[in-house]
Image (spheres, rainbow, N blue to C red):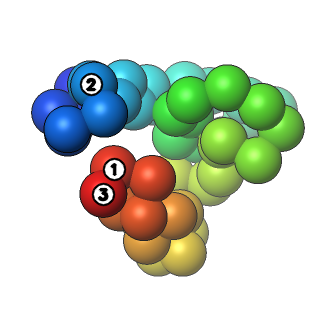
Amino acid sequence: MVVYRAAGPLRVTAARRDDRWVFAWGRGRDCWGPALDTEVAHRIRQVAR
């Protein structure tokens, strides 16, 4: 999925990691989290602002 924002598009990808689904966005160690974790959705929203 691509989230369009003023600073440029943010690409959010779903992937399997260690037999579970995760969302990944941006670059770095803190830019991914479990897909079913509601906190991850809040973190993506904060980055997309």
Q: How many marks?
A: 3
- In the rendered image, the quadrant that contains the N terminus is top left
Residue 10 vs residue 18: left or right? Answer: left
Q: Is residue 43 above or below residue 39?
A: above
CB-based contact (under 8 Å), mark 1 and mark 2: no
Q: As rendered, which of 14 and 26 lies closer to the eye?
A: 26
Residue type at numbered disc 3: Arg
On the image, the x and y values in percent for residue 18 come to 81, 32
Residue placed under numbered mark 1 in the picture: 48
Q: Earlier in the sequence, mark 1 or mark 2?
A: 2
CB-based contact (under 8 Å), mark 2 and mark 3: no
Q: Earlier in the sequence, mark 2 or mark 3?
A: 2
Residue 35 vs residue 17: left or right? Answer: left
Residue placed under numbered mark 2 in the picture: 9
Q: As rendered, which of 47 and 33 lies closer to the eye?
A: 47
Residue placed under numbered mark 3 in the picture: 49
Residue 11 vs residue 47: left or right? Answer: left
On the image, the x and y values in percent for residue 34 come to 62, 54
CA gap between label 1 and label 2 equals 8 Å
Residue 19 visible here: yes
Q: Quadrant of residue 6?
A: top left
